Amino acid sequence: MMQTPLYIIGAGGIGCAVGYALATARPIFVDANLDKVRWGNQHGLMVDRRPPVPAEFLHFDDWRPEPGCTVILCTKCYDNATVLARLPDGIILVPIQNGFDRALHPTADDIEGIASFVSECRPQRTCTRITRRGALHLGCRDGGGSPIARERLQTLAGLLRGAPFKVRLVEDILPYKYAKLMYNAAISPLAAAAGLDNGQLLSVPLARRLFFALLRENYEILTAAGIRLARIGPLHPRHVHRILSHPSVAKVLAIFFYPTLRGSYCSMSGDLPRGRTEIEFYNRHLIDLAKNRPCPLNRGVYELVKRLERERLQPDLAWLQQIARGEGESAATVATG
């Protein structure tokens, strides 16, 4: 798979972390930020306190991918259409993204990844730090994968040996992607709208109450849709859901997990001031999965974030009051307070 050029699209936190681990394969990084491209070509790639490694960076406008190349897609989902329009036939596309974008049209033979670790890149730099430990899960969809796809997975995993994160090959990538969506679609809109770091979702009472309720609603949407979920953190989603039905236990665990999230930020927090987020690929996807099933909190955060995008309004804790006052606030919200 790596005998042809290997491109990593998006030199953000995940792209830089994965690219650093793939340094021996000499990936070429492609990014639309010219300052980041210049800095990367001059200083190389850095992860945490590890020694920098040299790397080649291209501006997106100068990128001309060849047929047969491998493209690891680490962009935000809202940039996918621009990337896909540039791709020739016959490329190997490996998305490592949090959201669900129907424009990708993945098949059972396609390789995908989902990261349970958090990597935050410095602005205008190709230097990142891993702020939450975890793994990169790699697999095909629905337990599929031809012998060729399986061989590609093994090759990619082999190149990732020595990565600053764990690498796990999984039989079916979708349960891991949907488990990550359950968390991201609760963390991102609330933290971004309120201007909080991820840890404050557990320490600020109103934020915690809405966060727990949104997690429960997300779980219920996914399970009602018949979607299988996998463990992508310390606890399986079904155990999280059970814990959240016992408010006193949930509050104790919130105190325990707070230090692991303090000082880290969701990517939507940086996107919201620019008027474009991945809300369509997070909460809109859940709303569509819910169909006629009530999902008041997802609808509330979706409508709020779309308004903040549209009117370029500033994040504020008061926006969470608006969600809490929403006429569709579920009984679960009150129960988990």
Image (spheres, helix red, strand yellow):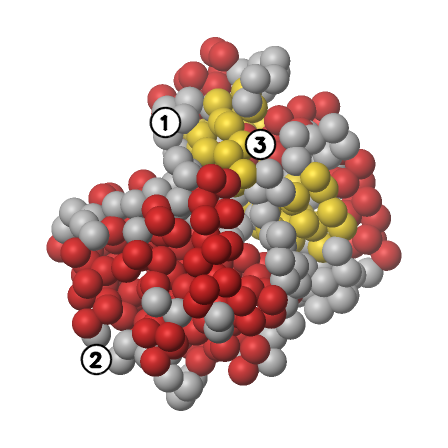
Report the side of 248 relative to 207 (left or right). right
Image point (53%, 67%), residue name: 243
Q: What is the secondary structure assignment of the residue under circle 3?
A: helix
Do the numbered discs 3 and 2 sit on residues whose CB atoms are within 8 Å?
Answer: no
Residue 289 at x, y percent in the picture: 47, 77
What amino acid type is highlighted by mark number 2? Glu
Q: Nearer the viewer, mark 1 or mark 2?
A: 2
Residue beneath disc 1? 123
Name the quadrant of the C terminus.
bottom left
Contact flag, marks 1 and 2 (Cβ < 8 Å): no
Residue occupying the point 65% across, 30% down: 164
Answer with left or right where residue 317 lies relative to residue 278.
Answer: left
Q: Give the residue number, with chain letter if any, for mark 2.
A: 327
SS type, badge 2: loop
Tell me which residue sits at (14%, 51%) in the image.
313
How much space separates mark 1 and mark 2, taking CA atoms? 39 Å
Q: Is residue 93 left or right of residue 60?
A: right
Count neighbours of disc 2 (C-alpha within 10 A) and say few if under 14, some if 14 to 19, many if 20 or more.
few
Q: Amino acid at mark 3?
A: Ala
Please state the horizontal and vertical placement of residue 190, each as a whole percent of the image.
32, 56
Mark 1 lies on a secondary structure that is loop
Q: Residue furthest bottom?
A: 292
| Residue 147, position as x, y percentages in the image | 86, 57
Disc assigned to residue 212: none
Neighbourhood count class around disc 3 (C-alpha, 10 Å): few under 14, some 14–19, many 20 upward = many
- Distance, label 3 to label 1, CA atoms, is 15 Å
Q: Residue at x 41, y 26 (%)?
A: 122
Which disc number belongs to residue 17? 3
First of labels 3, 1 by sequence position: 3
**Nearer the observer, 137 or 69:** 137
